[in-house]
């Protein structure tokens, strides 16, 4: 399908106002096709003009405009052209559409465990036309009347509530008319879903998941409902506007490309959030944050939708900000901001130093597909951090009053960044143009460095050389010695160098930490003396947020070439065993094990580093009296890094494990994957374990384990699955691509480096843009850290490439250069 240009959208919006969609979908036509009949009523401001709707059918049965038949030839290249429009128009399109397997359209998934079929609409920014003919742009919102024909034993869920008065007439199920929504928020989910229901404050609540996870949902439903209720109470207070969409269903769907999608009244989430096996506290926290995030969109994004895709950042940044704030304030997961500091912000810092960095706002989206390219660590955590700064800059109550003003002014309509800034200025009485220029319209991350001497303490603020900017920071600074807080003070950084008043230090600190409460978006640069003191100082640091800032400084310092990866290992061995905040414990383990071995550490140093990681994990695992969640995180680290095959074989059989892990399929697959990567398990044995676990997870993890086997035969088989499969799901492809180039298997993966850059773009004909973008990033050969890999990547970038692939490879090549520089500097 052709991607809608912004100029086309503006022209169409000036011509057309959409009044309603009446949509009928028939899911009883077999395994590949479904029926789609839509009646679109719309007005035209210029009678006699022409326009088009998005439409990508398999077969056309009839098209009429105002009762006149339209020839099928008017439908081409994903568009249906409409001529001689009248002031009031009725378009009726009856067609057969095709299911998709890449999550971009009406996705059809089969649960391998019981063979049951599940469907869900996932139109993203530009694929609603694969489901029904429509005006697919965010500022042409309209109410929907929906009917669905499906097997009688299936549940069917859509944006509107089921219409009991007209249910199951001739096999068709009807849904109540929705309030006006954008096309990319429309969805229908259908299949033999298991269901749990509840109610809160007059709002009907529903949870749905595939039948084979019914027991898990039953066990976890109350936790999810509790977070949902707490979220509604929080947002009713913050927004001052009642939830406007009637019922609130959350449908956990299989093979979902994103974390979740904020369809009003029918939120879709990936079904990995209904946990199989034991989950860590960090995973429970993440699920809570996602639930609160999607709920934020019911107002910010759904009630008020951006005018065009270049303001999509505001929806996501705002939901990201309030999700952390709401989770920390309204739920049991009070450590949400600590987790944000250690996980989300480090993702964002990496995105902001990549070649593809861009301003939070003001980045043109020339077409609809371009919107998805900027859904990254800048849109989410950096944007959220900027809004957190704006709240600190204006005062939180003033900020929230401005949000309420913005929502009330544009409810059920569309708005732009200028509308948002205007509401903030009107509410606060402040001109925030300069603030927006520095924070929203200029890319790059400031670096904060401390200078402490006999004359006092000062903080230097430096912007990236290529992106000069003057960003005010509302932040703080704290001084520590032997873990004791010697002094702390709030401050505002408006200049390149700011003298710090109010610390009143009577002892010389070992650690002076800017942004100790992590309120602003900046990388902290620690001097060499402070770095050298960290193995002793960090374990004594009582404040978890400050510890998170230190870890962030270390990991970003490694990427920037200012911190030796060996020092990070030293700090990890000294500080990680005493970490008592579960999400921070898990985040640091994931970062260090994913960043150093085979990447920033040379291949010859990697085995020893893995041994040190496994040894530290074992120290925590064997410690007395630690909570199960912490023991689980430690066991996962050992399972990912240990070379002790006897230990791993014992764990595979349940020996030496606590009861809660002994029969856990998810943990068992982690062990199997590590044994496979060590060459200690062959494909046939993996198949044996796959037969014992026929779930979706078993399918994906067995694919991943087979891919890890460091033999030419195993890699050839994995490569064939990645590039030659005709009906593999996006999750199956990702399971292969993300582990193909392992940290220690370069002898067998090196021959595939050039093939990756040649063959992946060839998948553009059969995969959607989102999936191709993900595979280009996940599969990048970042462990073959050699100048030759950079050369091959650079040659590939000289060719014509899909935009998402190009972006992933430009950024991947930049990270590869970072790794090479670090290895050259610190490799000895």
Image (tube, rainbow, N blue to C red):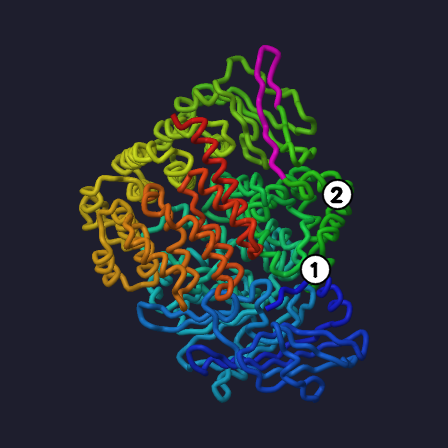
Instruction: Calculate the distance from the C-alpha at mark 1 to the C-alpha at mark 2.
Output: 24 Å
Residue found at x 32% / y 58%: 717
Give the quadrant of residue 702.
bottom left
Residue 370 included in the magenta stretch of the image: no
| Residue 329 visible in the current orientation | no
Residue range (magenta) = 444-459
Q: Position of residue 435 (x, y in %)?
A: 71, 39
Q: Nearer the viewer, residue 643 or 490?
A: 643
Labels 1 and 2 touching (C-beta < 8 A): no
Residue 703 relative to residue 779: left or right: left
Asked whether 771 or 205 is in front, the reply is: 771
How many residues crowd mark 2 within 10 Å: few (<14), some (14–19), many (20+)? some
In which quadrant is the N terminus drawn? bottom right
Work out whether mark 1 precedes mark 2 in sequence or the reverse, and give the earlier one: 1
Where disc 2 sits, the SS reads helix
Mark 1 or 2: the one toward you: 1
Q: Residue at x 75, y 43 (%)?
A: 428
**Quadrant in which the C terminus appears:** top left
Q: Is residue 48 left or right of residue 144?
A: right
Q: Which mark identifies residue 428? A: 2
């Amino acid at each position: 399908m052709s991607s809608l240009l912004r100029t086309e959208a503006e022209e169409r919006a000036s011509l057309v106002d959409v009044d309603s969609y009446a949509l009928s979908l028939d899911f009883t036509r077999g395994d590949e096709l479904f029926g789609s009949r839509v009646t679109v009523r719309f007005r035209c401001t210029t009678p006699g003009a022409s326009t088009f709707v998005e439409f990508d059918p398999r077969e056309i049965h009839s098209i009429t405009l105002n009762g006149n038949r339209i020839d099928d030839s008017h439908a081409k290249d994903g568009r249906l052209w409409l001529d001689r429009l009248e002031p009031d128009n009725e378009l009726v399109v009856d067609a057969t559409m095709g299911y998709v397997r890449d999550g971009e359209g009406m996705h059809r998934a089969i649960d391998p465990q019981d063979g049951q079929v599940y469907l869900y609409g996932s139109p993203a920014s530009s694929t609603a036309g694969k489901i029904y003919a429509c005006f697919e742009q965010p500022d042409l919102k309209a109410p929907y009347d929906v009917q669905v024909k499906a097997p009688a034993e299936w549940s069917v869920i859509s944006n509107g509530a089921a219409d009991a008065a007209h249910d199951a007439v001739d096999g068709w199920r009807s849904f109540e008319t929705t309030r006006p929504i954008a096309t990319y928020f429309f969805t229908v989910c259908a299949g033999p879903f298991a269901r749990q229901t509840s109610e809160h404050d007059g709002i009907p609540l529903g949870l749905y998941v595939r039948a084979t996870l019914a027991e898990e949902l039953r066990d976890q439903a109350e936790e999810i409902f509790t977070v949902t209720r707490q979220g509604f109470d929080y947002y009713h207070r913050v927004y001052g506007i009642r939830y406007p969409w009637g019922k609130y269903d959350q449908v956990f769907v299989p093979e979902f490309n994103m974390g979740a999608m904020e369809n009003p009244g029918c939120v879709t989430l990936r079904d990995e959030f209904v946990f199989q096996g034991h989950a860590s506290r960090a995973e429970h926290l993440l699920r809570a944050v996602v639930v609160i995030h999607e709920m934020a969109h019911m107002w910010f994004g759904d009630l008020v939708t951006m005018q065009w895709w270049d303001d999509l950042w505001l929806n996501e940044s705002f939901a990201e900000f309030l999700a952390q704030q709401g989770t920390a304030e309204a739920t049991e997961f009070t450590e949400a901001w600590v987790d944000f500091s250690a996980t989300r912000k480090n993702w964002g810092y990496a995105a902001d130093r990549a070649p593809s960095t861009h301003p939070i706002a003001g980045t043109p989206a020339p077409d609809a597909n371009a919107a998805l390219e900027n859904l990254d660590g800048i849109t989410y955590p950096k944007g959220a951090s900027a809004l957190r700064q704006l709240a600190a800059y204006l005062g939180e109550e003033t900020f929230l009053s401005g949000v309420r003003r913005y929502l009330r002014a544009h409810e059920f309509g569309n708005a732009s960044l200028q509308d948002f800034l205007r509401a903030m200025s009107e509410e606060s009485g402040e001109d925030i143009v300069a603030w927006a220029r520095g924070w929203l319209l200029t890319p790059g991350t400031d670096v904060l460095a401390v200078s402490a001497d006999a004359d006092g303490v000062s903080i230097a603020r430096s912007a990236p050389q290529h992106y000069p900017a003057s960003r005010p920071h509302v932040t703080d600074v704290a001084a520590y010695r032997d873990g004791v807080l010697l002094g702390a003070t709030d401050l505002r950084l408006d200049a390149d160098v700011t003298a710090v008043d109010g610390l009143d230090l009577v002892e010389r600190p070992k650690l002076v930490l800017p942004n100790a409460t992590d309120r602003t978006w900046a990388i902290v640069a620690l001097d060499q003396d402070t770095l050298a003191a960290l193995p002793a100082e960090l374990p004594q640091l009582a404040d978890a947020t400050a510890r998170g800032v230190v870890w962030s400084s270390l990991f970003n310092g490694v990427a920037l070439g200012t911190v030796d990866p060996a020092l990070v290992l030293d700090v990890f061995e000294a500080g990680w065993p005493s970490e008592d905040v579960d999400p921070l414990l898990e985040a640091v383990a994931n970062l260090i094990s994913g960043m150093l071995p085979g990447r920033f550490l040379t291949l010859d140093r990697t085995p020893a580093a893995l041994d040190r990681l496994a040894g530290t994990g074992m120290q925590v695992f064997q410690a007395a009296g630690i909570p199960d969640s912490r023991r689980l995180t430690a066991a996962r680290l050992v399972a990912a890094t240990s070379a002790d095959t006897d230990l791993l074989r014992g764990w595979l059989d349940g020996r030496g494990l606590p009861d809660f892990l002994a029969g856990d399929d998810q943990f068992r697959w982690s062990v199997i994957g590590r044994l496979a990567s060590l060459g200690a398990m062959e494909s046939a044995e993996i198949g044996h374990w796959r037969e014992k676990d026929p779930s979706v997870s078993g399918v994906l993890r067995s694919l991943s384990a087979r891919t890890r086997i460091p033999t030419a035969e195993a890699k050839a088989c994995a490569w064939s699955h990645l590039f030659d499969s005709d009906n593999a799901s996006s999750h199956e492809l990702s399971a292969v691509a993300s582990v193909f180039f392992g940290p220690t298997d370069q002898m067998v993966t090196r021959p595939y480096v050039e093939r990756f850059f040649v063959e992946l773009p060839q998948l553009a004909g059969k995969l959607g843009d989102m999936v191709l973008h993900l595979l280009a990033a996940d599969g990048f050969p970042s462990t073959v850290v050699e100048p030759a890999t950079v050369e091959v990547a650079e040659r590939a970038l000289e060719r014509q490439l899909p935009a998402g692939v190009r972006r992933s490879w430009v950024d991947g090549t930049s990270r590869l250069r970072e790794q090479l520089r670090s290895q050259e500097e610190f490799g000895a």
